[in-house]
């Protein structure tokens, strides 16, 4: 019991420390490019936290999360630029709308198992992408929304640079993490873990597996939608290309690299992949001058395969295990002089 | 053009693409039946086949020889992949294996991008000659090659599975892996065989379609996905189902694109897929039975 309390205190201390680091970083980093990378990491973290809830706790893969991300971005973009709706209202509308769409599409999708489920989410993602490309009057088609998307503002404070936007993104990312953490440690969280263990056993113990999975699916879609809205107001221009299958796969890669069953997993996975992708953009042209802009997908693929084969629980879990093993050996060494 | 000849035109182009989908779908079904894996990299095998073919032909190798070499090269590559990646992770969960094949597909596509670049390559049709007119519709000779190859390969596959030792061993693995093992069939070798055989089917599909669609490093994605859709339509475990699913998908897609909107062509396949999955979760020809715990 004492140990458990100690663990809980340690966890809270870690979260506090992390929060402190996150909010002092922008004062130390003066380079705008590094700051923008951190903003993107924050936005991606929000999506991946939701995806980890779905994959790690409900055991369901989604290859269509870029679609929810895109729905959020486009709802915000279209409502604010074409219809002059307030950005916050648009963000909310996107989140609610996407949540409802996810819930409705989830009803038939979650009747499916494993491979079929993966394929159905993938199909849904592709259909949304095709719609974004083809509904030119509404979305601007492949060339994107031509009208400018306004910046977000709080009162009279316009979030028009990386520094200001950073705080908003990371406050929301931390809220997303805390909310996810609460879900995990609630009754629903236990029910979800039981689904991951054995859906049949959970069902026979009276867990309404279908409803819980739907709720988590909708929640993760809402996360993605909010992140998409933030992205739209950060970049202030959107086109369909960042919301395609590659992005969906990238989110899955981030989730599995970080590891699914820990709240630190998403932050870790997103940071590793985003920083790696950015540094590849810097260094690859030096190594292979003729390589185009998409070579990083090779590295994505290889990392995904290697991690899945050798550390199926993700990097975080592997590191934690290594640390615990090291501590255990050290204690053993201390005990036997 | 009258409506009937228009419909005939869509039917013919649908059959051409449908034949390709059927070949890819067959590969999915064989791998899934023997190993339980959904191989998301199947489409990349199609692309590799087409790329090797174009490279060899451009290097001056006669078409027939290039075809054989290209297919064998893809089989070797896929064999190595099975050996290196799939076998090492054999005990992983289905979710993990799916993610691994997605990673493989991304890696193969990326390597192809590094080797061949983003430019599309053109492959000359197998036979020269103008389009052939059939009752108001036209068909290019290469389409006949596609349909002919599909029929021939399907017949050959049927023969291999029914009459050869290795085909029978593969089927035994499908029926009951444990019993097959007791009979001295090595499941690991069967997994390798299934992958290599599916690779040959995919490579052939890529080679015969290359003169019609151009060859690009990212051609595999859509072909692979639609092959998978076709396999699912057919129930994912039935070989005749995969063939019918492929042809049906090709025809529906071509009709939909022609009669409704060509921009939504890629969307149509997935809308059909979602409808079938929702209405009949086991596919059109599959048995949607209960799963044993």
Image (cartoon, helix red, strand yellow):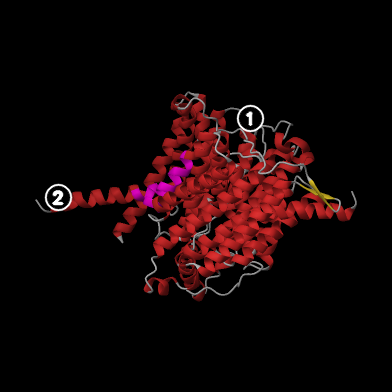
Sooner in the amino-acid sequence: mark 1 or mark 2: 1
Q: Which element is circle 2 on?
A: helix
Q: Residue at x 26, y 51 (%)?
A: A325
Q: Which residues are magenta?
A: A299-318
Q: Chain of mark 1?
A: A
Label 1 packing within 10 angstroms: few (<14), some (14-19), many (20+):
few
Which percent across, then down, holds residue A337? 9, 50
Which percent across, then down, holds residue B106? 51, 44
Is A329 situated left or right of A53 in this image?
A: left
Q: Which residue is mark 1?
A: A158
Q: Which element is circle 1 on?
A: strand
Is B263 situated left or right of B100 in this image?
A: right
Q: Residue at x 48, y 56 (%)?
A: B195
In the depicted view, which residue is nearer to us: B2 or A333? B2
Q: Is residue B142 visible?
A: yes
Q: Main secondary structure of the magenta part?
A: helix
In the depicted view, which residue is nearer to us: B66 or B235? B66
Residue A309 magenta: yes
Please tell me the numbered disc located at residue A334: 2
């Amino acid at each position: 019991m004492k140990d458990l309390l100690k663990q809980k205190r340690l966890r809270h201390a870690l979260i506090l420390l992390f929060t402190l680091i996150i909010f002092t970083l922008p004062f130390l980093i003066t380079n705008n490019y590094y700051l923008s990378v951190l903003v993107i990491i924050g936005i991606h973290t929000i999506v991946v936290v939701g995806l980890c809830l779905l994959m790690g706790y409900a055991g369901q893969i989604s290859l269509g999360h870029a679609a929810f991300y895109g729905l959020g971005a486009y709802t915000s973009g279209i409502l604010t630029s074409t219809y002059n709706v307030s950005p916050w209202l648009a963000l909310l509308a996107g989140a609610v709308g996407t949540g409802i769409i996810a819930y409705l599409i989830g009803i038939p999708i979650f009747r499916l198992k494993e491979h079929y489920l993966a394929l159905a989410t993938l199909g849904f993602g592709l259909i949304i992408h095709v719609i974004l490309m083809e509904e030119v009057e509404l979305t601007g088609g492949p060339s994107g929304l031509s009208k400018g998307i306004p910046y977000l503002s709080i009162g009279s404070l316009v979030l028009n640079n990386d520094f200001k936007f950073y705080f908003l993104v990371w406050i929301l990312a931390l809220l997303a993490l805390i909310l996810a953490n609460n879900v995990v440690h609630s009754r629903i969280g236990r029910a979800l873990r039981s689904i991951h263990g054995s859906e049949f056993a959970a069902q026979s113990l009276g867990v309404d597996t279908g409803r819980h999975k739907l709720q988590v699916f909708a929640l993760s879609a809402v996360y993605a939608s909010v992140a998409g809205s933030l992205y739209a107001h950060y970049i202030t221009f959107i086109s369909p290309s960042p919301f395609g299958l590659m992005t969906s796969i990238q989110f899955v890669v981030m989730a599995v690299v970080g590891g699914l069953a820990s709240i630190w997993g998403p932050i870790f996975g997103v940071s590793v992949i985003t920083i790696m992708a950015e540094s590849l953009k810097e260094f690859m042209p030096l190594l292979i001058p003729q390589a185009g802009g998409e070579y990083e997908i090779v590295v994505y693929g290889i990392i995904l395969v290697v991690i899945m084969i050798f550390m199926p629980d993700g990097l975080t879990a592997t590191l934690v295990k290594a640390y615990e093993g090291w501590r255990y050996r050290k204690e053993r060494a201390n005990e036997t002089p | 053009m009258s409506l009937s000849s228009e419909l005939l035109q869509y039917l013919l182009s649908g059959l051409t693409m449908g034949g390709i989908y059927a070949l890819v779908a067959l590969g999915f079904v064989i791998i899934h039946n023997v190993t339980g894996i959904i191989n998301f990299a199947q489409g990349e095998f199609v692309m590799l086949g087409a790329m090797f073919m174009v490279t060899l032909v451009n290097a001056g190798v006669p078409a027939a020889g290039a075809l054989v070499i290209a297919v064998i090269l893809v089989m070797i590559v896929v064999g190595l992949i099975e050996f290196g990646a799939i076998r090492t992770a054999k005990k992983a969960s289905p979710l993990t294996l799916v993610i691994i094949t997605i990673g493989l597909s991304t890696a193969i596509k990326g390597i192809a991008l590094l080797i061949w670049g983003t430019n599309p390559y053109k492959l000359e049709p197998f036979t020269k000659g103008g389009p052939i007119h059939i009752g108001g519709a036209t068909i290019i000779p290469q389409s006949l090659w596609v349909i002919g190859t599909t029929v021939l390969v399907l017949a050959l596959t049927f023969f291999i599975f029914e009459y050869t030792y290795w085909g029978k061993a593969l089927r035994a693995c499908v029926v009951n892996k444990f019993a097959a093992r007791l009979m001295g069939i090595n499941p690991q070798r069967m997994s390798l065989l299934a992958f290599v055989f599916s690779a040959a089917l995919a490579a052939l599909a890529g080679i015969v379609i290359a003169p019609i669609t151009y060859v690009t490093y990212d051609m595999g994605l859509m072909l692979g996905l639609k092959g998978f859709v076709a396999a699912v339509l057919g129930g994912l475990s039935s070989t005749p189902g995969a063939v019918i699913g492929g042809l049906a998908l090709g025809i529906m897609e071509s009709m939909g694109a022609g009669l409704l909107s060509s921009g939504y062509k890629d969307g149509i396949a997935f809308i059909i897929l979602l409808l079938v999955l929702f209405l009949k979760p086991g596919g059109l020809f599959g048995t949607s039975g209960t799963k044993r715990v």
